[in-house]
Image (tube, rainbow, N blue to C red):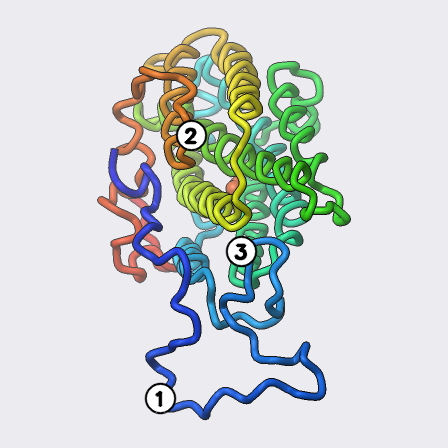
């Protein structure tokens, strides 16, 4: 699996910035001394910052304590697109004239699940997580993430409109299909536990709940469910079908890979600062719930196998990816021995088969106007 889709390797950026020793400071005037009249206006030090409960100034970007977070923000800004820039003409033909009923069933339910999930993702990062952060470099990436989740919702809506799907039916599907509802209910339960703005993160139990919920969100909801959620569509693309939709999803997947990597890094940082360990029993419960709901979902959207894809392949890949997310957090693998079931995924998920998105020149994919469609 190549580096990009395995995850962006963010470990090359130091965990903690060397505080207050900027090499470029030679042209600047000396830092002002602390305001003796008001100690709250003393210059901010990087060491004042923490993921939560920090004493820096939330409106002052630098000095960075988490320079890697700023790097994430810069990387995220290189993945620009708008759904209207992708040619969907062939998808309209494919959907109405080439897909089998089983393929249409899968396609519609994937869209129904993803569109509800992305609104939930936007609310979670914007309302439950971002406000708890006390370092602006963390918040600024999360602000970008909020926008990206909204952009993803626009993308699904654009696909639904372009294919002339019945909107009321698609958007209400998660409410009436238990296998979709189950995933949303589980995610909402996690979201509701940390949504309150008066959450007391100085309480160890509450802090653990917050870390666990954020891990569920970044590692499972985004890192497994979303990451794996596009695969059925890539299976169609592999056979030359629904290529416009698949290209839309390639762009979304690039965002989601960063969302997952960023979230896991923040949680690792939080745990280190707060000397916190995730309770293995609680983590095991998370995996069990996530696996059961993913299995029910896979068995519903793929109640009939389609050419080259099945519920077994889907759940097998979920477990393989889940192990990787656990390793990223230093946790035990929840599904020992799980093997990758989709050897073609990298090739199908890579936009125009770039070797590594983040090593490619910015001008090749910056802004939709300069993109070329194959
Ligand atoms: Fe998203
Ligand atoms: Fe996301």
Q: Are marks 3 and 1 in contact (CB under 8 Å)?
A: no
User: Is residue 244 visible in this depiction of the protein?
Assistant: no
- Report x, y in % for residue 56: 59, 68
Specify whether 283 is left or right of 178.
left
**Label 3's element?**
helix
**Label 2's element?**
loop
Give the crowd class for mark 2: few <14, some 14-19, many >=20 residues within 10 Å: some
Q: Residue at x 33, y 50 (%)?
A: 11
Q: Residue at x 70, y 17 (%)?
A: 176
Quadrant of residue 261 in the image?
Answer: top left
For the N terminus, the image quarter is: top left
Count of labels shown? 3
Specify whether 47 is left or right of 58.
left
Q: Which residue is mark 2?
A: 331
Badge 1 residue CB within 8 Å of ligand 2: no
Tell which residue pokes out farthest to the left in this image. Answer: 355
Identify which residue, 160 or 51, lies in the foreground.
51
Identify which residue, 290 or 283, lies in the foreground.
283
Quadrant of residue 80 in the image?
Answer: bottom left
How far apart in space, not on screen, are marks 3 and 1 (Cα)?
A: 32 Å
First in sequence, mark 2 or 1: give its number: 1
Q: Which residue is mark 3?
A: 144
Q: Which residue is mark 1?
A: 26
Identify which residue, 226 or 249, lies in the foreground.
226
How far apart in space, not on screen, are marks 2 and 1 (Cα)?
A: 44 Å
- Report x, y in % for residue 372: 31, 51
Residue 370, above or below 304: below
- Report x, y in % for residue 77: 43, 59
């Amino acid at each position: 699996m190549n580096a990009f889709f395995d995850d962006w390797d963010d470990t090359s950026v130091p965990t903690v910035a060397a505080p207050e020793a900027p090499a470029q400071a030679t042209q600047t005037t000396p830092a002002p001394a602390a305001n003796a009249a008001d100690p709250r206006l003393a210059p901010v030090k990087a060491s004042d910052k923490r993921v939560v409960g920090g004493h820096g100034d939330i409106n002052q970007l630098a000095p960075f304590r988490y320079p890697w977070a700023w790097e994430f923000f810069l990387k995220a800004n290189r993945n620009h697109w708008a759904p209207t820039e992708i040619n969907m003409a062939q998808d309209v033909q494919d959907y109405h004239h080439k897909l089998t009923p089983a393929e249409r069933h899968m396609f519609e339910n994937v869209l129904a699940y993803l569109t509800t999930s992305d609104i939930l993702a936007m609310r979670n990062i914007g309302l439950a997580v971002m406000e708890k952060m006390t370092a602006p470099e963390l918040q600024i990436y999360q602000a970008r993430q909020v926008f990206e989740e909204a952009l993803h919702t626009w993308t699904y809506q654009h696909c639904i409109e372009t294919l002339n799907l019945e909107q009321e039916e698609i958007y209400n599907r998660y409410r009436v299909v238990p296998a979709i509802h189950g995933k949303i209910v589980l995610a909402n339960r996690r979201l509701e536990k940390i949504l309150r703005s008066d959450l007391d993160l100085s309480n160890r139990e509450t802090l653990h709940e917050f870390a666990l919920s954020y891990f569920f969100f970044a590692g499972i909801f985004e890192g497994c469910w979303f990451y794996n959620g596009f695969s059925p569509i890539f299976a169609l693309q592999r056979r030359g079908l629904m290529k416009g939709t698949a290209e839309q999803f390639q762009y979304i997947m690039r965002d989601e890979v960063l969302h997952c990597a960023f979230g896991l890094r923040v949680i690792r940082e939080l745990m280190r600062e707060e000397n916190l360990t995730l309770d293995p029993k609680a983590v095991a419960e998370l995996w069990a719930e996530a696996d059961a709901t993913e299995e029910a979902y896979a068995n519903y959207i793929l109640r009939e196998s389609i050419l080259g894809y099945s519920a077994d392949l889907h759940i097998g890949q979920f477990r393989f990816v889940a192990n990787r997310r656990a390793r990223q957090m230093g946790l035990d693998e929840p599904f020992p021995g799980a093997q990758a079931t989709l050897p073609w995924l990298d090739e199908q998920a890579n936009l125009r088969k770039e070797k590594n998105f983040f090593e490619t020149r910015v001008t090749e994919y910056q802004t939709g106007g300069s993109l070329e469609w194959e």
